[in-house]
Amino acid sequence: MPTRKTTLFYAVLLAIASVAIGMVLASRLDLSPTSSAQPLTTAPPANSAPIAGSIDATTFRTIARDMSPAVVNIRTESTPRTEELTEFFGGEDFLRRFFPDREQPGQGQGQGQGQGQGARPNRRQRQAPQSQGAGTGFIIDAAEGLILTNNHVVENANKIEVAFYGDDSDVEYEAKIVGRDPLTDSALIQLLKKPAAALQQVKFGDSDQMQPGDFVVAIGNPFNFNHTVTVGVISALGRPFPVGPGRSVNMLQTDAAINPGNSGGPLLNVRGEVVGINTAILSDRAQASNMGIGFAVPINLVRELVPQLRAGKVTRGMIGVTIAPVGAEAFEDLGLSSRSGAFVSAVTPSGPAAKAGVKALDVIVEFNGKAVKNRDQLVDMVTRTKPGSTVPVKVIRDGKNTGLNVTVGELDLEAEAGTTEEESAVEETAGFGVGLEDITPDIARRLELPRSTRGALVSEVDPGSTAANGGLRRFDVITQVNGQPVTSAADAKAKLQAVASGRLARILVMRGAQELGFAIRKD
């Protein structure tokens, strides 16, 4: 029989052995941390000092020399997508993404290559081959081997390999996706194994400082010509670019030559600091290449997301409304003193805004203590708000200021993409280009309306009329005009005719199960 000391000895030995075995299994199963460095918990610092000084013959040479080592070439293997990108952007739309093209011999752009990542497979094939793609990225944390790039470069990748400046073309290092954000088209990847030589990381500038005419430098891998340097200027600011159904990002526009393969590369200011991520180009289908109009995501939008990308998930706020701009000639009729705010055309049932009391036809003029200048600013305010936060919201309703408290929900992009948002507009309506009918029991049954529904059925909408342009559709049910309930077709007609020429009619309708609001001016 073993002694008490012997028993204790073996117990300790067994515990040590268990820990050791556990560590080996964790390393085999990739359960342990990949780096001993502390993860990024704050956004990387940015230089917001004013850009000053002269540009000489060595300015761009110095930027190219100093920053090229921080720029990497990214190669991917992925299963080709089943849908055409041009279908998402509207058929023959000339605005295309940088899905960098690795053209195979004998396959020209006329063979359907477009901007896809490598050769597009035959759609009739049962099993699509792996598609080869390429793009660009830049190192933001040398210690952890973290690299920023575009989401669309890596989002479908089964394998990611990274090549460094000055290395032979066949020397590549595997990487994995850490976090992705479709709304800013950004992604953070991490090297699984770092080179023996020390890595160089970029410095961040302030994209809010950039103005049209400012010099910028792009470094990337267009058409697999590694670390190509081009110089241009900021051509424009705040160019809206679609990143998803009903959503867009205000981009920096530049004439610095960027082409397929530059995607995910840095746009640098004259201090060699990153002010944007090159993302898209304007091109025609024949050339699929640079036409002097490129777009970059402002780095300020992405830089503040780095901690969330590092954690593997980006969360954003939502309040559940469909909003439209306030019309140039509509603000007075909406009870506003200036053309500001965001017009609420629809409220998601049971959503945060609906629970707080926001209604269609409201104009949101203040969010969380800050004035709302326009629709885009409100979207930006809401998405940047932490889900779960309760914030004060001010709306103009029937010309009166109303204060509400909204508890912000969490934006679910997949759920949002799966729904069809109603079109909304702030337009005129005049006499009104619509046919109205009473809601009979048969109509209510066919439209599946609640028995208590009162109003007027829109039976016809004249093409090209102000009602059609304003968003009204056949089979809409008008329930209110200018805040007054509608009981019948005759009642709706009388209320619409009472609207003076040149004034707005605020029309509330039921479309299916959703309540929508339209502000339409009478001719």
Image (tube, grey):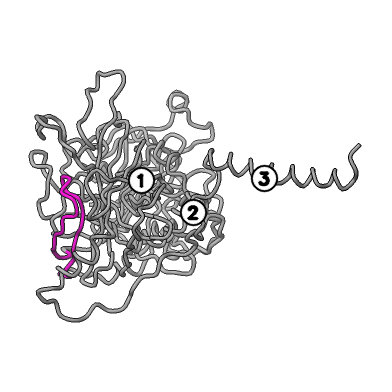
**Mark on residue 389?**
none
> Local crowd at mark 1 within 10 Å, few (<14), some, or many (≥20)?
few
Q: Where is residue 374 in the image (x, y as percent from the top left)?
A: 34, 62
Q: Name the residue under label 2.
A: 35
Disc 1 and disc 3: Cα gap in Å?
Answer: 82 Å
Three-letter code, disc 2: Ser
Residue 282's place in the image compared with 208, above or below, is: above
Q: Which residue is drawn at 79% across and 43% down?
A: 10
Residue 28 among those drawn in magenta: no
Disc 2 and disc 1: Cα gap in Å?
Answer: 72 Å
Whether tag 2 and tag 1 are in contact, CB under 8 A, the answer is no
**Mark on residue 494?**
1
Tell whether 191 sits left or right of 111: right
Q: Mark 3 points at which residue?
A: 19
Question: Which residue is at the front of the view, 173 or 175?
Answer: 173
Magenta extent: 213-234
Q: Nearer the viewer, mark 3 or mark 2?
A: 3
